[in-house]
Image (tube, rainbow, N blue to C red):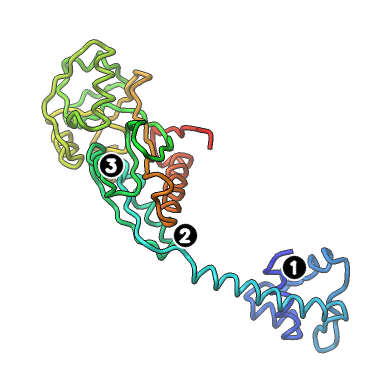
Amino acid sequence: MELRQLRYFVRVVELGSISRAALDLDLVQSALSQQISRLEGELSTRLLQRTTKGVTPTEAGMAFFREAQLALRHAEQAARAARQARLSGTVSVGLAPTTAAVLGLPLMHAMRQRYPDVRLHMVESLSGHLTQMLNARQLDLAVLFETDAARRWSVTPLLEEKLYLIRSRRGLPAKAGASVSIAELADMPLILPTGPHGLRSTLDAAFARAGIRPVLAAEIDSLALLMDAVDAGLGATLQPWAAVGRFADADRRFHLAELSDPLARRPNVLCSLSDDELSPAALAARVVLADCARERVLSGLWVGARLIHHDS
């Protein structure tokens, strides 16, 4: 039995007509009749009887009508109490530029829909800076690429991303491959972020495994400027697909070749202050963020990402 069935039945009794109730409820009359019949079937009793002027409740129907009215009033009171007590406050969320390109707007939309009284403070910065801000308690939660287990954080693995060699299509050979090994990058000018940030640590480890030293054309700690430099043909970069997520014409501008090194992956970890330090609004936002990330991956909108399954 559903609340809508109670609502439909009460309106039919109040108006004394299924056709008028259907019009009032903006339903097709046959659909409303089907709902009433289903309700009678669940209760194993006749609730309405037809007359020349419409319908009237049977004795059982009148008893049910009174209780249904009461149940609907209680449901409305419960909804009103929930609205009055719904979460409020401010939650600070840190995302790296690549992560923000894929996850930022979906998170904001989901929070507005689920918790309209919670105000988000969104911070976009490189992961090293976000780590410092989280340690200084300037953020409630952040998506990071590496963590220090000694810190008193709540840590939840989210997903891992493949890494790609990203080059401008200007002057690129027509038969550029779909994948590339680290060894093939030995003489290629690269534009990378600097050392304190999670992606660079992953790349340095991959270079070390391959026994090569990368040729650095530039080090840029700004995703927008870095991708502008790649677009201009000043060098290639190694990034997850999300680095081109803000380019509507990414397929025309850039060529992406997946790194074949199976360990060249970027983990995304949801880190927050410990649970006892987080407000109810921040705890809720953490759940919503994880849900959004999962939805983006499962829907195929986060290219090259794979969910990390963990025990809850």
Residue 262 figure quarter: top left
Q: Which residue is at a point 76% across and 82% down the rendered structure image?
A: 13
> Residue 291, how many percent across, how many down?
47, 46
Camera-near label (2 vs 1) is: 2
CB atoms of marks 2 and 1 within 8 Å: no
Q: Residues within 10 Å of mark 1 (few under 14, many from 20)?
A: some
Q: Residues within 10 Å of mark 3 (few under 14, many from 20)?
A: some
Mark 2 lies on residue:
114
38 versus 122 height, above or below = below
Give whichever of discs 2 and 1 has the lower sequence position.
1
Camera-near label (2 vs 3) is: 3
Residue 144 relative to residue 40: left or right: left
Give whichever of discs 3 and 1 has the lower sequence position.
1
> Residue 225, how many percent across, how many down?
15, 40
Looking at the rendering, in which quadrant would you find the N terminus? bottom right
Label of residue 183 in the image: none
Residue 272 relative to residue 59: left or right: left
Closer to the camera, 96 or 18? 96
Closer to the camera, 229 or 216? 216
Residue 73 relative to residue 181: left or right: right
Label of residue 35 in the image: 1
Helix, strand or loop at mark 1: helix
> Residue 41, how many percent across, how many down?
84, 65
The amino acid pointed to by label 1 is: Gln
Helix, strand or loop at mark 2: helix
Q: Given the current orientation, which residue lies at the most extreme bottom position?
A: 53
Mark 3 lies on residue:
135
Residue 171 relative to residue 199: left or right: left
141 versus 38 height, above or below = above
